[in-house]
Amino acid sequence: MEDIRSRQVIIAGAGIAGLTAALAFAGRGYPVKLIEQAQHLEAAGAGIQLSPNATRILGKLGVLDRLLPAALRPEAVVLKDAGTLRGLARVPLGQAAEARWQAPYLVAHRADLQAALLAQMAERPEIELITGARVTGIVKDAQYVAVTAEVDGREIEARGKLLVGADGVWSAVRAQLAGEDFVKSRFSGELAWRVTIAAESAAGEAFVAIGAADCVTTFLHPGFHMVAYPVSKGRAFNLAAFTKGERMAEGWSGHADPAILTAALRGTAPGLTKLVALAGPWTAFPIHTVEQKRWTSPQGIALIGDAAHAMTPFAAQGAAMAIEDAITLADAIADFPGDLPRSFQIWENLRRPRVAKAARRGAVNRLAWHAAGPVAIARNLFLAMRSPDKLAADLDWLYGWRADTRQSRSST
């Protein structure tokens, strides 16, 4: 009889990356042990944008139908000048997105996505979820990778074919991999200021007065931008503002001087200033990045999502890249079940160029959206010359992507 450990996949981290990976591997017949440090799963952050490249995969995994009742299809991405509130560009979404990319563009609360992933996972007996488990050691022997974790003061061990580090920016798995190829996260110098406001509130009314309640609205200003969109079926709006800032204590959120946000708003329209004031208090999130030389290890370990390549959120692709990582890694392992090195090579050859391109898109967006003076004028002229259809076409490479590990085999 086959030893289950020869096929078992151990996943550290039950966020979006880890839950998606668990479903992807279970769908290919692998038993999965999912280890999560938190005692209770709670969705960090607030709203999330899910572009068609992500929702297409969620559909394949059976998650999309569970998410749709709680999500919204925004009609467009709208760019506005924060100083004048003049419209600069409009990228059509809604039915246009589904017609163009054969999958919906959604906005939702992170908790709703997590609930949909967990509900689908509950239908998969191949997956065992262990919460309150902190990874304390990783050892590779001749056959298996062994992971030790502390649970309620006692130590447990899991052995398997593969360990997937899906444990985020401050990955415990990455921290235990020795060598210069495995690095710590780095503060980007940017802060994300987040808040969720009720639609039927003074702040909600202030947003509707200057934005579009059924769209993703982005306000652009020198050194600052703010994104706003509906969540919870339109009962609330998620707001995220981005500024320069000082490094905070390591963690997802913390206290930052509100004067930073106030200063960034100088020169913006009174309606936007009013919205920001009414929406508070805001929570500041330091934006960290991770730039790994390698995402895999001969020890039988692969890093996915933020653990491998945390990027700035300016292309709204962090979750999408993690979801893509998860399904393509499962495909690569299943295609060559007896050859981990080959699977790893195929997977990295496929993923690295795409993730790098998505990160570059975010960097370009940040420069364009925070531009001042002649650069901002040139940006506005460029956007004015691009039709909505051409702006959508610029995103075909990103939103129209389909997972296929076979694309990279010719280079191995």
Image (cartoon, rainbow, N blue to C red):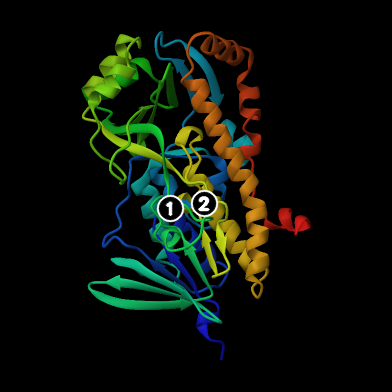
Asked if labels 2 and 1 touch by Cβ distance under 8 angstroms, the answer is: yes
Residue at the right extreme, as displayed: 410
Q: Residue at x 74, y 58 (%)?
A: 409
Q: Secondary structure at mark 1?
A: helix
Q: Mark 1 or mark 2, which has the lower sequence index?
A: 1
Q: Residue 95, image x and y in percent?
A: 56, 33
Between residue 66 and residue 273, name the one nearer to us.
273
Q: Residue 270, image x and y in percent?
A: 30, 10
Above/below status of 25 relative to 83: below
Q: Residue 395, image x and y in percent?
A: 62, 32
Between residue 66 and residue 30, name the one nearer to us.
30
- Three-letter amino acid code at the position of disc 1: Ile
Q: Where does the C terminus fall, quadrant-wise?
A: bottom right
Q: Quadrant of residue 212?
A: top left
Q: Residues within 10 Å of mark 2 (few under 14, many from 20)?
A: many
- Three-letter amino acid code at the position of disc 2: Ile
**Residue 205 in sight from this viewpoint:** no
Position of 152 compared to 356: left or right? left
Q: Residue at x 27, y 72 (%)?
A: 151
Between residue 270 and residue 372, name the one nearer to us.
372
Q: Secondary structure at mark 2?
A: helix
Above/below status of 290 relative to 139: above
Position of 407 compared to 84: left or right? right
Q: For mark 1, what is the residue?
A: 16
Q: Where does the N terminus fall, quadrant-wise?
A: bottom right
Q: Which mark is residue 154?
A: none
Q: Residue at x 64, y 48 (%)?
A: 402
**Residue 300 in sight from this viewpoint:** yes
Q: Which mark is residue 323?
A: 2
Residue at the bottom extreme, as displayed: 1
Position of 235 compared to 330: left or right? left
